[in-house]
């Protein structure tokens, strides 16, 4: 399809829009808005709230429409703007519950489409032309809502047809519902309690209506003005390619810019930075909480693209995590701090972006805010999904009810559900962690671990436990194994269990040169997301004993054991220490 079709000659039923006609139209619209405003004051309509807990499990209606049309390549920016506007509106409507007998009003739920809410220029049908307008494209949502309301036998209280037919739209079959703030509204009333679900996939807008019981075959069908016969209407044309150059709205067609990709980073792991550096383009949007991190620096990407940072939310998250008095509070500070960072990134994310690579810590919040709607996205995975993580901890806690630390690492239910839904919709997950990659099968891209540059060392004579001393890191099984072996133990992390947890084991204080003193590094953890000390041991040629959940399967010198299997751990320790001629029971100080 060419970018600029031949010039179109208006027929007798069409006239070229003029600035004066547009002024008259604006005055009429202002009068109609004022009139509707007065009516709304005299006969107010309730604004309904979202309620995910309402017992409405049965889907009774579904309407879907394609997000993208291909009749004009030069209006790509307006298509992108329309999808952005649908994202904002979907966030406001998703989950809304409308009680039986009450009225749903499109504009009462959304309010005016303004820039400060995030709305941008999209396609809007006005006086027979498709022109750029803030909030343009919301009619696609009202069309789908109208179709779903008809399916669910709602009473159609107010509905307006478009003045022109947009090719490929519901107007072609007479089931459209145009809206214009606030005088052209879509209103309907359900016969039973309903919940509205609005979702955007990368290719489609879908509206579903859920209820407690199916629609009765004997239910009264929607009445006028619900279903109207199709009437012949002239086609609408876009200002960018209608061929009419004498119109005051005329815009010269121009090709849209290159499609941009966004990288929303959080944990700057060297594996992720190497991946981004390999794939990023100069026009891509790259943002991180801070441009330097503990394990790597995003500044290295500055040579290939422009970088952005959300410094203030990151600083507040760091302060709150440091001030947290215990592990549960620290986790909450981390989770809610990530929410604020995700919110800042969402506000800065250009609406032209269609593909996103997002850090897992930001995923639940971005999914809840609908900022990933209508986009393809990949996830940089740094830990087990919350749902999987909680199952592991619950199973271990049931076997060891006396260990409270197995019950403290928890995320809110809403965050768990949001992450699970988002991961199900992700195009791909990216991680160096073998156990995490295994959960996603063919959808996983497993990166190679970044092995640090560490000189190989002469093996020491003690067991090193990276820690911290907490049950989920395998401290319980390690204690039981070492009591029988009489080995010296160096712990690098804090003790988060009771003070006498290591009674019966000789524990040495952590030393800066711990790697040179290690005969073996042991992490028999139920959960280990970022095994950097183990990677240092691998690089130095020191044997490593860990569980498969540490994610190092396949690396040389790594022996895997089952979490909580004391006998298996003791056997592995004995084999490694004996092979290395380490003298059990004698420290190497």
Image (cartoon, rainbow, N blue to C red):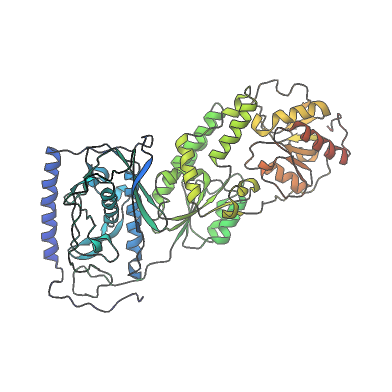
Q: Is residue 441 above or below residue 195?
A: below
Quadrant containing the N terminus is bottom left
Name the residue nearer the viewer: 439 or 274: 439
Q: Residue furthest front?
A: 218
Asked if residue 488 shows in the view, the reply is yes
Q: Position of residue 530 (x, y in %)?
A: 63, 43
- Rendered image quadrant of residue 50: top left
Q: Position of residue 348 (x, y in %)?
A: 40, 51
Name the residue nearer the viewer: 248 or 29: 29
- Rendered image quadrant of residue 21: bottom left
Image side of residue 197 versus residue 567, left or right: left
Name the residue nearer the viewer: 292 or 332: 332
Image side of residue 255 versus residue 111, left or right: right
Q: Position of residue 539 (x, y in %)?
A: 75, 48
Q: Looking at the image, which residue is at 54% across and 39% down?
A: 387
Q: Looking at the image, which residue is at 31% across and 52% down?
A: 119
Asked if residue 513 shows in the view, the reply is no
Name the residue nearer the viewer: 59 or 130: 59
Q: Looking at the image, which residue is at 69% across and 32% down?
A: 474
Q: Is residue 347 above or below residue 101?
A: below
Quadrant containing the C terminus is top right
């Amino acid at each position: 399809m060419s970018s600029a079709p031949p010039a179109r000659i208006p027929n007798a039923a069409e006239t070229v829009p003029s600035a004066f006609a547009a002024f008259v139209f604006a005055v009429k619209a202002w009068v109609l808005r004022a009139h509707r405003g007065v009516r709304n004051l005299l006969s107010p309509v309730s604004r309904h709230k979202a309620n995910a807990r309402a017992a409405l499990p049965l889907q009774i209606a579904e309407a879907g429409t394609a997000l993208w049309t291909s009749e004009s390549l030069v209006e790509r920016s307006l298509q992108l703007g329309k999808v952005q506007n649908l994202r904002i509106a979907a966030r406001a409507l998703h989950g809304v519950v409308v009680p039986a007998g009450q009225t749903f009003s499109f504009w009462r739920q959304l309010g005016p489409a303004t820039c400060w809410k995030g709305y941008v220029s999209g396609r809007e049908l006005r006086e027979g032309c498709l022109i750029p307008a803030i909030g343009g494209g919301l009619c696609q949502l009202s069309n789908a809502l109208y179709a779903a309301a008809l399916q669910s036998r709602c009473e159609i209280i107010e509905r307006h047809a478009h003045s022109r037919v947009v090719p490929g739209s519901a107007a072609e079959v007479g089931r459209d519902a145009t809206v214009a703030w606030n005088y052209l509204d879509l209103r309907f009333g359900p016969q039973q309690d309903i919940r509205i679900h609005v979702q955007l996939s990368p290719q489609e807008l879908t509206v579903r209506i859920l209820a407690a019981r199916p629609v009765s075959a004997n239910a009264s069908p929607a009445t006028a003005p619900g279903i109207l016969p199709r009437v012949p209407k002239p086609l609408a044309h876009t200002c960018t390619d209608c061929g009419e150059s004498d119109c005051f709205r005329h815009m010269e067609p121009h090709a849209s810019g290159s499609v941009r990709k966004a990288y929303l980073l959080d944990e700057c792991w060297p594996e992720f930075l190497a991946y981004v550096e390999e794939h990023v383009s100069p026009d891509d949007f790259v943002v991180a909480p801070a441009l330097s991190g503990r394990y790597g620096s995003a500044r290295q990407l500055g040579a290939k693209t422009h970088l952005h940072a959300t410094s203030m939310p990151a600083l507040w998250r760091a302060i709150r995590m440091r001030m947290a008095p215990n592990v549960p509070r620290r986790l909450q500070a981390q989770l809610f701090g990530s929410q604020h960072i995700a919110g800042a990134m969402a506000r800065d994310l250009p609406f032209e972006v269609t593909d996103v690579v997002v850090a897992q810590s930001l995923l639940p919040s971005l999914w809840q805010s609908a900022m990933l709607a209508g986009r393809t996205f990949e996830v940089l995975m740094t830990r087990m999904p919350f749902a999987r993580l909680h199952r592991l901890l619950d199973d271990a806690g049931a076997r060891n009810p006396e260990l409270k630390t197995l019950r403290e690492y928890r995320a809110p239910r809403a965050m768990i559900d949001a992450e699970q839904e988002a991961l199900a919709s992700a195009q791909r997950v990216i991680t160096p962690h073998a156990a995490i990659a295994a959960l996603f099968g063919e959808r996983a891209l497993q990166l190679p671990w970044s092995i640090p540059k560490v000189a190989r060392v002469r093996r020491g004579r003690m067991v090193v436990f990276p820690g911290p001393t907490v049950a989920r890191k395998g401290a319980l099984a390690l204690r039981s194994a070492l009591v029988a072996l009489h080995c010296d133990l160096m712990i690098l992390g804090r003790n988060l269990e009771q003070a006498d947890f290591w009674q019966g084991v000789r524990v040495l204080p952590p030393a800066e040169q711990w790697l040179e003193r290690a005969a073996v590094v042991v992490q028999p953890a139920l959960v280990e997301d970022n095994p950097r000390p183990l990677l240092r041991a691998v690089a130095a040629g020191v044997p490593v004993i860990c569980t498969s959940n540490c994610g190092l399967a396949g690396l040389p010198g790594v022996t895997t054991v089952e979490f909580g299997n004391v006998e298996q751990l003791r056997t592995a320790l004995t084999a490694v220490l004996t092979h290395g001629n380490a003298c059990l029971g004698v420290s190497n100080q």
